[in-house]
Amino acid sequence: MTPEKQAAAQPALLPLPPMKWDAWGDPALAKELSADIKGLLAAALGVTGDAAPGPDASEVALRPSALTPDDLAALAAIVGEANLSTADADRLPRAGGKSTPDLLRRRSREPQDAPDAVVLPGGENEIAALLALCTERRIAVVPFGGGTSVVGGLDPERGDFAAVLSLDLRRLDQLLDLDETSGEALLGAGLTGPAAETLLAEHGHELGHYPQSFRFATIGGFAATRSSGQNSAGHGRFDEMVRGLRVVTPVGVLDLGRGPASAAGPDLRELFLGSEGALGVITAVRVRVHPVPAVKAYEAWSFPDFATGAAALRAVEQQDTGPTVIRLSDEAETMVNLAMTEKIGGEPAVSGCLAVTVFEGTADQVATRHRLTRAALLAAGATSLGEAPARAWEHGRFNAPYLRDSLISAGALCETLETATTWSRLADLRSAVTAALSSSLPNSLVLCHISHVYPTGASLYFTVVAALGEEPLTRWTTAKQAACDAIVATGGTITHHHAVGTDHRPWMTDEIGDLGVRILRAVKAELDPAGILNPGKLIP
Ligand SMILES: Cc1cc2nc3c(=O)[nH]c(=O)nc-3n(C[C@H](O)[C@H](O)[C@H](O)COP(=O)(O)OP(=O)(O)OC[C@H]3O[C@@H](n4cnc5c(N)ncnc54)[C@H](O)[C@@H]3O)c2cc1C
């Protein structure tokens, strides 16, 4: 056996949560589509039959590690042998994120790309030493949190370098400090959502940040991508919870964030929120926490159409009535959700648009917030569907990504994209993106919901389902490009919460202008002079 084959055959050294390498999430929770749903896909979208199965992990040919024995010895000297691996079993799960294109690429029987090695540093000193070594030896570094990027943020791009290292933060998994008086916690960047909530719950506190990727994504990843959770009107945006950050860069360590507010010049925390591993490695995040809510209340609503529903959500947000969750599905999404959910209880919304509200807090706060929101929604044309559909939404909210895998296996392409704009432009943006997707993917289903609301606008989240067809990757890339062009032309942001990565990078100049790009490049040149950090991501 060659040394490369021996390395490839090594067992995984590094424990991972039960995430499939070629699909979403825990293998134990995989879902099968019923024959009825497959029949519907065939009739409505021309889905002609199951996709060819992809390879087993053991069948995947990875390009051998390009790191020299001397590089590996130097890396091991920093993190220890036990925290360095070139085994395929460790490289493959860190070969990219979890977008539909990522998953389609995993199904390929051609040789696949992956980082040349995986390191698990145990703290800031080791990260600083790794960055110094990689700068000196010209090795690219991709910081790796939970591996849930959907924008190519983890692609093992080497840039101008011969090799690329996956720097996995999972050992930074401690609750480092909890200031209950101030309501702040310092969390290690490698803590997953559930691990952070478990540690905080031991002290009666919570973060309350629940993106759909919650079970696997990390605190550092939330900060590095400006994640948004499903408590969309309560603790929605992670960047709004961040009080401080510790970041290790190739030229030094930053400890940012003093006090609850500051007038000490531009807020440098903002440079690292959304920096996607291109400017430094976030090692710890100081976040606002709050007591676990004592009471929750639920109510779902039906609106005759999307415009009426959107105006009602705007009224609630602008009157600041205080729901923790408020979201609205369009007609198509409402219909599909009802078809996919055999029984959600309550009075079914047979037509129109479904909205969900959830309220949290003390009993008094919940009663007041519920009453005020109810009044605003009823005045704006809502019909109450009772609490069952809202409870059903919460119960199943982490399940949809498993459905995407079943759809792909059944021969259907399924992907999502998101944007945001002002209330006055929302309808135009929705029409433009829907038209772009529908014309590039004829015979497709385009679903949309308002996922997050703000006083001045909202985000739109699209789901597209179509037949996989002959060249699914090319078909999706063309449709995504058309949708992104439509977003830019209609004044939306290229991403509300998925971040930039490689996929949205071509539109960054539209987003921030030439001068904005030059500023980012100048910051990168200062912090990462050799350009080792996550080449090819974020900055055009
Ligand atoms: C099924 C599914 C559902 C999703 N739902 C949501 C959602 O509801 N809301 C939402 O906002 N997003 C969602 N996402 C996108 C993704 O989960 C988020 O972007 C998440 O914040 C990424 O966290 P992570 O720990 O997995 O980071 P990773 O995917 O590992 O990394 C993301 C990017 O951040 C960089 N990075 C990671 N950690 C660090 C660090 N410590 N320091 C510096 N850079 C770092 C990486 O290099 C990469 O560029 C979803 C993704 C999937 C697959």
Image (cartoon, rainbow, N blue to C red):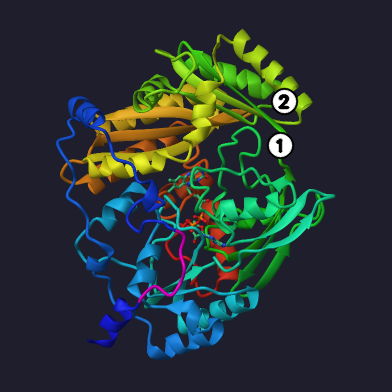
Instruction: Please rate how many residues cluster around mark 1, counting C-alpha atoms within 10 Å: few if below 14, some from 14 to 19, many from 20.
Output: some
89, above or below 355, in the image: below
Q: Is mark 1 within 8 Å of ligand 1?
A: no
Q: Residue 518 at x, y = what percent? A: 54, 58
- For badge 1, the amino acid type reads Pro
Where disc 2 sits, the SS reads helix
Closer to us: 392 or 416: 392
Q: Say whether residue 15 is magenta.
A: yes
First of labels 1, 2 by sequence position: 1
* Residue drawn at the location 32% of the way across and 31% of the way down: 436
Q: Residue 318 at x, y = what percent? A: 67, 22
Quarter of the figure with residue 258: bottom right
Q: Which residues are magenta?
A: 11-17
Left/right of residue 142 with respect to residue 110 in the rendered view: right
Q: Residue 52 at x, y = what percent? A: 17, 50
Left/right of residue 31 with respect to residue 245 in the rendered view: left
Circles 1 and 2, Cβ within 8 Å, touching? The answer is yes
Residue matched to label 2: 366
Residue 244 is marked as none
